[in-house]
Amino acid sequence: MKFHITLLVVFVLSSVLSFIGCKEVFTWFLECIPAFIGVLVLIFTYNKFRFSNFTYIVILLHCLILIIGGHYTYAEVPLFDWIKETFHQQRNNYDKVGHFIQGFGPSLIIREIFVRKNVVNGKKWRAFIVISIALAISAFYELIEWFVSVNSGESGDAFLGTQGYIWDTQSDMLTALIGAFVAVLLFGSIQDKSIKKL
């Protein structure tokens, strides 16, 4: 319980710091709202279903990535501007970190629910379904980005963050797919150990 409260405090403080001096309030809201909704769901379902500590840490990491993107906008995170200049990249690639975790985090959340609720027993089928759901989430998020961008003008463009790259949507989904594969194939056993401690 104390560990979970500590994670929640880190989330709340990070959210406040992210809002202070954020580049654009509307973009901050759009980028951070998935984290806020997710944390509220976790709070309201806490007594019915508690995730393993490992999964909660992954969820916090996912939230922090969203919150950082909200503060600066994904196209202007300073560290990734430095990486862009140092390695002669054409764009600030922080949004790829966001889309990687968009596949990584949900995969582990879904996987833990499937494991603990015995939704799918076969490991190969479970991995396939978890990765497919993560990819579906990524595709749905791309539709949300498109809808907001079409209906919000310049603020929506900051949320979309394509930076002139015509294949941004497709590469975002690919990055999320890679994140899902990495989560399930390389971190599944770590998650299983954390589940056993419950």
Image (tube, rainbow, N blue to C red):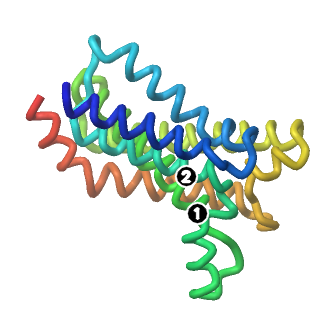
Mark 2 and mark 1 lie on one chain; the one further toward the N terminus is: 2
- Tell which tag, 2 or 1, sits nearer the viewer: 2
SS at circle 1: helix
Q: Secondary structure at mark 2?
A: helix
Q: What residue is drawn where x is 22% and y is 25%?
A: 116
Q: Position of residue 17 (x, y in %)?
A: 53, 45
Task: Measuring from the top left, give residue 57's x and y in whole percent.
Answer: 30, 43
Query: Callout 1, which amino acid?
Result: Tyr
User: Between residues 43 and 5, which one lies in front from this camera angle?
Assistant: 5
Residue drawn at x 83%, y 45% is 155
Instruction: Check the image and name the residue furthest to the left.
Output: 197
Q: Which quadrant, please, contains the C terminus?
A: top left
Q: Residues within 10 Å of mark 1 (few under 14, many from 20)?
A: many
Seen from the viewer's position, the closer of residues 87 and 70 is 70
Residue type at mark 2 is Ile
Q: Residue at the spot x=29%, y=39% of the render?
A: 55
User: Left of 156 or right of it: where is 63?
Assistant: left
Closer to us: 109 or 39 = 39
Reading the image, the residue beneath label 2 is 68
Q: CA distance from mark 2 to mark 1?
A: 10 Å
Numbered tag placed on residue 82 in the rendering: none
* Contact (Cβ within 8 Å) of mark 2 with mark 1: yes
Q: Which mark is residue 94?
A: 1
Decide if residue 160 is on the left or right side of residue 113: right
Provide residue 193's location: percent of width, then percent of height: 12, 43
Q: Give residue 74's position: percent from left, percent from top.
A: 65, 57
